[in-house]
Amino acid sequence: MSHLEVDRVSLAYRRPRSTERFFALADVSLHVDRGEFVTIVGPSGCGKSSLLMLIAALLRPTSGVIRLDGREVRAPGSDRAVVFQDFALLPWRTVLRNVELGLELKGVKAAERRAAARRYIAMVGLRDFERHFPHQLSGGMRQRVGIARALSVEPEVLLMDEPFGALDAQIRALMAVELLRIWERDRKTIVFVTHDIDEAVYLADRVVVMSASPGRIIETLDIALPRPRDLDIRNAPEFAAYRHRIWELLEEQVRTSLHWPTAAS
Amino acid sequence: MNRPLVGSISVVLFLAVWQVVGSTNLVRSDLISYPSEVAATLAKMAASGELGSNAVVSLKEFVAGFVPAVAAGIAAGVVLALVRRLRLFFDPLLIAIYQAPIIAFVPILVVWFGVGTQSKIVMVFLSAFFPVMINTMTGVAQVAEPWTRAVRAFGADAFEVVTKAILPGSLPAIMAGIRLGVGRAIVILIAGEMYVSIMGIGRLVQVYSSAARAAEIIVLVVVISAFGFACVSLLRWFEHRLGPWRSELEQ
Amino acid sequence: MPEPLLLGTAGLAAFVALWQVAADRGLINPTILASPSLIAAAFANQWSSGQLPADLGVSLGEFALGFAISVVVGVAVGVAMGLSRTIEYALDPFIWFLYSAPLIAIYPLIVVWMGFGFATVVTVAFLLTVVSIIVNTTAGVQSVDPTLIRAVRAFGGTTRDVVFKVILPASIPLILAGLRIGLGRALIGVVLGEMFGANAGLGFRMTVYAAHLRTADVFVPLVVFIAIGVASTQLVGLAERRLQAWKV
């Protein structure tokens, strides 16, 4: 049985003051095994973030079911932890208190909570910044706090919604390396959404390519690159092949969504 | 589920409940009155001229005090904003008077200026002057540096700088100060007239308060509120008219 | 000594000195306006006789109670209005009326209903203050960053968690601003109430002194009111600055 199962899920919105329905996601199915690192790429507006929100149960599917370990997902919970693109840290709390938030909401007692939070803060390399406030940190550091917060509740699945999207390109590459380093420790199941193809290939065991809206899964690529991976692997010919294939698929999708002429027309 | 609809329903419901509770004497109607009685009382007071003659007195006192307060407040605000040392010199005094409950000055002002209209005019002036001055000061201080430089670059002298750059630029702050002044001035005026006076809306309030006439008091509450609302609406309209000019200057 | 402090103190000192000199030279009519020295003497007198402390106690009590009740009710209603559009739309006309109508006129009704005394003054102070707290609290709640609320929900937070861990902390700056404005209004409410609807307290005492043309005594409660107004506003301003340390 797969760890996380998305079973023919659709998400539709009703336009205000009309009976017309607009589909963000159409009949999406996906299986993720325990310990797998899956990335999802697609053009803007293809619904990939919505898919993540559905798994997190912050949205409810119009049809279809999402299951974790065979059990249907109905409400948000600490078994699926989210890392957000805009970090979503509480500005009036220190780094320590921010990381404690997840455990606080789980009802963990103060002393235990504090110890756990400090452990994860050290894991992301921010031990000297426990008493700092978010506004005193750089973007990359803030996201590391977000990652620590998500890991601290020891989720079954880590859901990452374009987590490096707000960071500049050089930082993004280093954060990816950092993320893999942390992931190698206990190999959590991760679903990672991005629009950056290189990032998607570099991180993943499998890349899922989505179509333009309404979002469907066009193709899934198994990434057979060896681990552990350093940044040099991006220069390898196999990497380029994956990159090329994904770009081919996406170019067509992006052009369609922007009404630009495609290769086919 | 939109704002005007829910709001209107809420108000209508309130009026209906009030009407029923008051007119059936569920709660003593001499304590709370009810809408139809209030309306009738309003008509009666207007017809007898009682409302009109007192309103005129209060209005005169208000205008006589408010207009000079705005003029003086703006002038003082501009000067204090531009002359830093002067501002620092007067600061504690100004803060003390601004943050003090102006209404506490009423008894003293009556001792100094008597029980008639003169003391009320002074009260209105004092209560409106400080908000206008302080807001003007803040507004001008924010605007002074960058704008003065820009206008001066075009070769303007001091007076032109003030009229063409500073005043228009600090207009929002000045208007905010004037709006604040209106609220305070109305409160002080009515309070002063209630404390002691020969004529005026406040005096009517005091008279009917001693007689415990709820209906008349409510009529006066409505009249005073309407006046306050009219003033603020007038100011907003005025600011609106000057608005487009303001944003053009921002370029 | 920093320049602002120096100049400011000089200004205050000059004002008092000028006043005293003018009085000593007989330039001011003593039955209209007393000199600073006489006022100081009156202050000492009223204090040692116990009159001033008693009045001060009454006024402070009314101020504190009226303000405290306004804060509790104001924040609660403000949060409710901020969270629910329906509640906001329904209460809005009344809030707007209470905010813009000069409540000075409402107070006689309160006297009609409640008579003279402590409770009336507290009620007037409450009514005057609660509205500005509600308005600012509602604005504070409505300006909370929705992504923070989403984050808390994502980790399994209940509505209670959202209110206490996100909305309230995030609204504090605006709530404090509302409190600061409310302070001024509460004090006016106390003075107003005491002048017209009570028989104890600083405001009441002022009207008594004024009626007897005791020009030195009448200044004492006035100065005390000014001091209370300034002190409380500065205190809240201080709290505002400290609690916003996390804001850039």
Image (tube, rainbow, N blue to C red):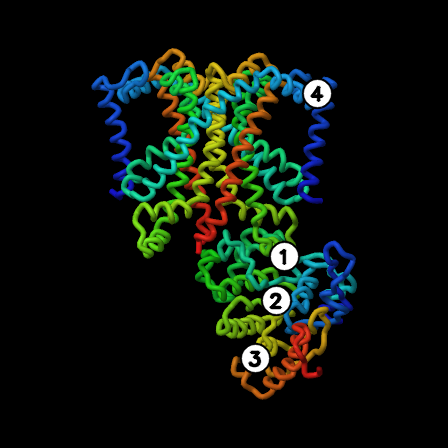
- What whole-number distance in Å separates the C-alpha atoms at marks 4 and 1? 52 Å
Q: Let me know if residue C239 appears in the view.
A: yes
Q: Badge 3 local density, few (<14 within 10 Å), some, or many (20+)?
A: few
Residue position marked by numbered label 2 in the rendering:
A160
Disc on the earlier residue, 3 or 2: 2
Task: Find out whether the residues at labels 3 and 2 contact each other: C-beta distance under 8 Å.
Answer: no
Task: State whether residue C196 is above or below residue A184.
Answer: above
Viewer-proximal residue among B43 and B187: B43
Q: Output the chain of dot 3.
A: A
Q: Badge 1 local density, few (<14 within 10 Å), some, or many (20+)?
A: many
- Disc 4 element: helix
Q: Badge 2 local density, few (<14 within 10 Å), some, or many (20+)?
A: many
Viewer-proximal residue among B139 and C149: B139
Residue under the point 46% across and 44% down? B172
Q: Give the amino acid type for the residue marked by disc 1 in the picture.
A: Phe
Residue position marked by numbered label 1 in the rendering:
C155
Percent of width and height locating residue A151: 58, 63
Viewer-proximal residue among C155 and A35: C155
The disc label shown at residue A228, or none: 3
- What whole-number distance in Å separates the C-alpha atoms at marks 4 and 3? 82 Å
Nearer the camera: disc 2 or disc 4: 4
Residue under the point 56% across and 58% down? A88
Q: Give the amino acid type for the residue marked by disc 2 in the picture.
A: Met
Q: Are marks 3 and 2 on the same chain?
A: yes
Residue at the outermost bottom position: A237
Q: Give the amino acid type for the residue marked by disc 4 in the picture.
A: Gly
